[in-house]
Amino acid sequence: MSTDRGLTGKTAIVTGASRGIGLAIARDLVTHGVRVCITARRPEALKEAAAGFPESQILAVTGKSDDPAHRREVLDAVAETFGGLDILVNNAGINPVYGPLVDLDLDAARKVFEVNVFGTLAWVQDAVKHPGLSFRDRGGAVVNLSSVTGDTPSPGIGVYGISKAAVSHLTRTLAVELAPQIRVNAVSPAVVKTKFSRALYEGKEDEVTRDYPLGRLGTPEDVAAAVTYLVSPDSAWVTGQILTLDGGLTVAGGTA
Ligand SMILES: NC(=O)c1ccc[n+]([C@@H]2O[C@H](COP(=O)([O-])OP(=O)(O)OC[C@H]3O[C@@H](n4cnc5c(N)ncnc54)[C@H](OP(=O)(O)O)[C@@H]3O)[C@@H](O)[C@H]2O)c1
C-alpha cells in the first residue's frame, strides 16, 4: 500500500541494497509509491531481496558500485524501464581493514576510497550526464551514506572514517554545484545494527548502548525514515546537509 509523501510515481536507485540499511531504504521508498532499482555484488542475495517487493516496483541489477560498466548497465536499465530518475541513494560502502593507520595497507585504503568516495561521486556524475534519465530536469535528489566516524576519530577504523569525512564534504560541494535543480544531502549514522557493524556491538550491546542517551543502537528503519524525508518534497529547502542519526551519542560526547 502506498502512503503518499509527494513521492508516488518517482523513481530511485539505491546501491548496496540486498540487506541492511540499503534494503530498508528501498522498502520505505516503495511503501511511499517509488519504483526502485536495487544493486549488490552477490546475485542470489539480491534476487532474494527483490522477491520481497511488488514486481512492478522493483528492478535489481548485480554488480560492483565502483565498476563503470555496472553503473552504465543500471542507468540504462532505469532509463528503459522507469523512463527517468528522480532519486539516487549512494548507500554501498565498505570497511575491509582494521588496525592503526601507521600499519595501514595503502592498497586496501585505495579500495575503500574507490568504493566509498569515488564510487559515490561517479554515480552522481553518470546519473546527471545520462541522456535518458533527465535527472537534473526532474529536480533530482541525492542522499549519500556518511558516518559519525567521519566527524570524530574512531581508532581501528581510521581510513573508513577518513573516507566518510570525504563523503560528507563531497555532499556539501555537490550540493552547491548542482543547485538549484538537484538537492544533495547525506545521513550520518552511529552504530546501526546490521551485518556490517556486528563486530562493534555483538556480545557487548548493553555496554555499547550505555553511551547512547536514547538507550538503544540504530536500526536500518531509523536511517530509511530519514532518507525518505531527504528525498521528499518535505525537505525541498534542504541541501548540503549532513543529518546525524545517533540516538544522541555525539551530543553527549560519545564516539562510535
Ligand atoms: N551499519 C552501521 O553501523 C553504519 C553506520 C554508519 C554508516 N553506515 C553506512 O551505511 C551503508 C550501508 O551499511 P550496512 O550496515 O547496511 O552494510 P551491510 O549490512 O554490509 O550491507 C551492505 C550492502 O551493500 C552491498 N555492497 C557492499 N559492497 C558493495 C559494492 N562494492 N558494490 C555494490 N554493493 C555492495 C552488500 O551486498 P553484497 O555484499 O552482495 O555486495 C549489501 O547489500 C554503508 O555505506 C556504511 O558505510 C553503516
Image (tube, rainbow, N blue to C red):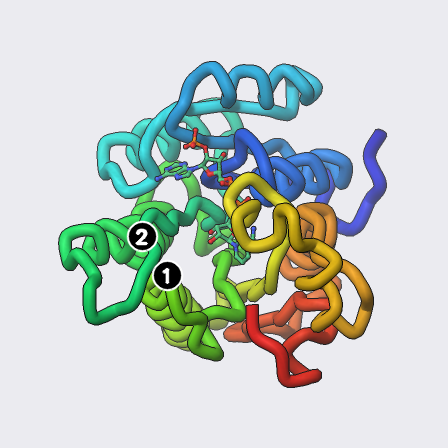
Is residue 220 found left or right of 178 in the rendered image? right
Q: Residue 151: horizontal and vertical position, in percent?
A: 47, 78
Q: Quadrant of the N terminus?
A: top right
What type is the residue that disc 2 sits on?
Answer: Val
Of residues 64 and 250, the one drawn nearer to the viewer in this rendering = 250
Q: Residue at x 17, y 56 (%)?
A: 105
Of residues 47 and 86, the one drawn nearer to the viewer in this rendering = 47
Reading the image, the residue beneath label 2 is 97
**Contact (CB < 8 A) between labels 1 and 2?**
yes
Marks 1/2: CA–CA distance: 8 Å
Question: Is any part of residue 115 visible from this angle?
Answer: yes
Is residue 179 found left or right of 73 in the rendered image? right
Q: Residue at x 65, y 19 (%)?
A: 56
What type is the residue that disc 1 sits on?
Answer: Tyr
Q: Residue 100: horizontal and vertical position, in percent?
A: 29, 67
Categorize mark 2 by other alpha carbons within 10 Å: few (<14), some (14-19), many (20+): some
Return the mark for residue 52.
Answer: none
